[in-house]
Image (spheres, rainbow, N blue to C red):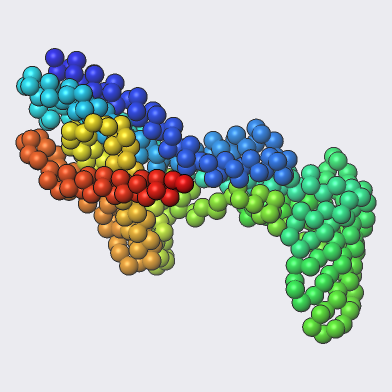
Amino acid sequence: MGKIVHRYVFREIVVPFLFGLSVFTFILLIARLLKLIELVVTRGVPVLNILQLLSYIMPAFLEVTVPMAMLLAILVAFGRLSADSEMVALRSSGLSLYQLIAPVAMVALLATAATAALSVWARPWGNRALKTALFDLARTRASAGIKPQVFNDDFPGLVIYAEIIEATNDRLHHVLISDERDNTQHNTIFAREGAMVSNPATQAVTLRLRDGFIHTTDGRAGAEYQTHFEFYDVNLDLRQMLEGARQRERDPKELTLGQLGRAIAAKRTAGLPVLPELVEYHRKFSIPFACVVFALVAVPLGVQPVRAARSRGFTLSLVMIFAYYVLLSIGQALAEQGLLPAVVGLWLPNAIFGAVGLYLFERTARERTLVQLERMQSALAALRDRLLGRLGAEAAP
């Protein structure tokens, strides 16, 4: 009978898990999706490139939404079992809460393993691939964005004009550039020819001009002068071309676990600060472990008797997710500033939720009433009714 019950509970968890994963991931992606869609509309970036960028940022979102979905799934599953009196029937048949924990433990371990894989391998890969893809896309758009016999103003502070552009090698002829990037002076640049030069290592794109002169108007000195050159480089700022799509990541977020360990060892040997690397190192373990502590808290909360199991489960999951990630954000910020050791800042939320989960689980397993939880639920219900009543009164004519 135990195996049948375990399979039944497992199926009850899987469906809301998939639903929660889809909903939470979509919610977190909305802002980024709008910015990516803007690139298609305003910058003419191909849809396939947008889908590629989306695949690179997905691991960072899934790393967060997998624990969130697991918490929601357990709360909803056990809430439904309790609301339909199935939990009472299972306990009457001799099954304790400890015996029902097996399918929950399986889900928690699977979610932990998936989140760990996302954190240790997938997210660093995605960050590196995103950085490279954005540079390649910006470089391509920089070349394609300059049209012959058109004044191009895609780059901040620059207006670029070229009489002829060779399509085969992006070489420009008879180039005119108005450079107003320096507020104290204005440069007008004339060149016989120019070419796009990219540097993937520094992720910079330069317009290298040849055989020309610069007419400078110095606003402070009130003087004008000309400078002749054989070669002159104009660095192009690509940020505006992909504004909003690029979220620059610190280098530690692009490193795998092994690379982080080597970076920490090398910096310590050189006497350099290692706070960013230590914070990222502990983050790769603390977030996956959140699946375990979420399961520990969700089971006793889910089995509490309530009628609206699904709505209560969703509300509780949002409250717990908010509390956990607020604690995590505070701990991470304090650790990055050196006010807390990284291990404390990143693991404190797990320690707090784990302690609360053990306490709730032990009392629920012994079928003791959670007085504090009932009081909290009553207070939340009263607050909800008051807010709904106020909204209804304001809406009434």
Residue 195 or residue 363, whichever sits in front: 363
Is 244 on the left-hand or right-hand side of 286? right
Residue found at x 82% / y 85%: 221
Farthest bottom residue in view: 221
Farthest front residue in view: 397
Residue 183 position (above or below residue 344): below
Residue 199 position (above or below residue 84): below
Residue 259 position (above or below residue 308): below
Residue 377 or residue 45, whichever sits in front: 377
The answer to which quarter of the image holds residue 4 is: top left
Is 263 on the left-hand or right-hand side of 178? left
Instruction: Locate the N terminus and report the quarter of the image it occupies.
Output: top left
Residue 165, image x, y percentages: 88, 46
Is 194 on the left-hand or right-hand side of 281? right
Residue found at x 55% / y 51%: 247
Asked whether residue 133 is in view, the answer is no
Q: How many marks?
A: 0
Asked whether residue 374 is in view, the answer is yes
Residue 293, image x, y percentages: 24, 42
The answer to which quarter of the image holds residue 214 is: bottom right
Residue 258, image x, y percentages: 39, 46
The answer to which quarter of the image holds residue 177 is: bottom right
Residue 304, image x, y percentages: 18, 35
Residue 75 or residue 169, whichever sits in front: 75
Residue found at x 54% / y 45%: 31
Residue found at x 31% / y 49%: 386
